[in-house]
Amino acid sequence: MPSLPMELYSEIAQYLDRSDLAALSASTKTFHALATPLLYRHVVIHRSPSVEQLARLLQTLVDCAVDFAPFVQRLELDWSAADYCGRPIASMLHACLPRMSALTFLVINASACTLDDVTMPALREFHLAYWAELDRGFLARHPHLKRLSLGGWRSGSLPFHDPMPQGLEYLCMSSAPFALALLKRLPQGKDAKLARIDLGMTGGLQLHEGAPSELLRLLQDSFPTVSQVNVFGLYAPIFLEHLRATGTRVMHVTRVGVQGYGYGNDIVRRIFVAVAHAFPRARTLDYRSGEDGFRIHALSNDEIARIVQGIEGLNHVDLVIFPHGKVYSRSGNDDFELLPTHVDDYPQVFWPNL
């Protein structure tokens, strides 16, 4: 094969899958230097069978004479099913993360993760399944965060230290009171940056605290930039009906997501009626049901689309989007028809059951 400029080889390597990159790395010293950063740029280790692989990777990053850590840009880790080795893994991760100077995206599904005094200057997106033990200064040390998910929590947890990331565009929390407290410390009005919020209603106590209604009133009054709201969790239908009963509305939200949990016709209809009241200008509905493979489908997509069609307050809704990007669009005769194409922006919610 004729020799090509190294810049061209570098461009071609960007499009190779991991197996091809590994083969390229093993071929020559020159290609090893070219391929190695690409092999480490996106690391994904999911579920308990990969726990030993994760431990080996972190040990390599700790011990190896060649520092691979600066190559990592995206890191997705799940050792939630391996409590027996959670602490050692967390300890090694704690040692490696500060050296990942290019890391912009971090997902951790683990209960034993504190990240005490860890700073990742390039971090822009952070998703943590269990944040009860998270260092309360973590957010203050990462002022450039744009997207944040915090899942499982404990009552009585202490608030995060100021300042909050002032450019936050996406927030997902499974506690309305904590989400409300965080929102109050973000830029508001003409300085607001937040565009989407996902709110998990996993405990009925949150309704009695009044935080969900207050949170939505804050969105209406102080966050004109928010155009998308997703409500999930076992108590989401009760929460939505609570909003209807209290007259809480957010007029500038145009996209709303709800979770079905295999509900039948009556409950689904009540959910959509409540959505119509709380978000009267919604034009897109995302219906979450069955992404994890364990939900019972009580209604077909066609039936759900017909329910939307029959609710007067949802006459502005043009699109109903289902898991895996299946889209129903309102046609000229006001019916919903399944489109042949799928959308690629179906809203992912990490750990919706926490």
Image (tube, helix red, strand yellow):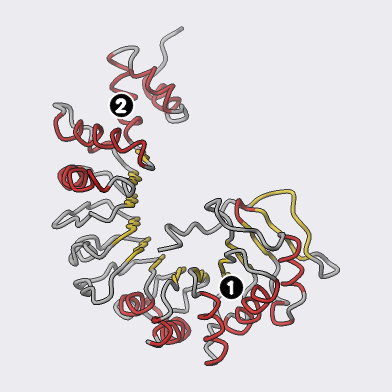
The one of 234 and 303 positioned closer to us in this rendering: 234
Q: Quadrant of residue 189?
A: bottom left
The one of 215 and 36 positioned closer to us in this rendering: 215
Q: Is residue 44 above or below residue 288?
A: above
* Furthest-bottom residue in this view: 246
Q: Mark 2 = which residue?
A: 36
Q: Quadrant of residue 336?
A: bottom right
Residue depicted at 71% across the width and 60% down the height: 301
Q: Quadrant of residue 147?
A: bottom left
Position of 248 with respect to 54 (left or right) is: right
As shown in the figure, which amino acid type bears the numbered disc 1? Thr
Return the x and y of residue 276 as percentages of the image width and height: 64, 80
Give the mark nearer the N terminus: 2 vs 1: 2
Quadrant showing the C terminus: bottom left
Q: Mark 1 = which residue?
A: 254
Q: Is residue 21 above or below residue 233?
A: above
Tell me the SS state at disc 1: loop
Q: Residues within 10 Å of mark 1 (few under 14, many from 20)?
A: some
Residue depicted at 19% across the width and 34% down the height: 59
Tell me the SS state at disc 2: helix
Residue depicted at 86% across the width and 69% down the height: 333
How much space separates mark 2 and mark 1, taking CA atoms? 44 Å
As shown in the figure, which amino acid type bears the numbered disc 2? Thr
Return the x and y of residue 9 as percentages of the image width and height: 41, 21
Return the x and y of residue 280 as percentages of the image width and height: 62, 82
Return the x and y of residue 317 as percentages of the image width and height: 69, 72
Q: Residues within 10 Å of mark 2 (few under 14, many from 20)?
A: some
Which mark, residue 40? none
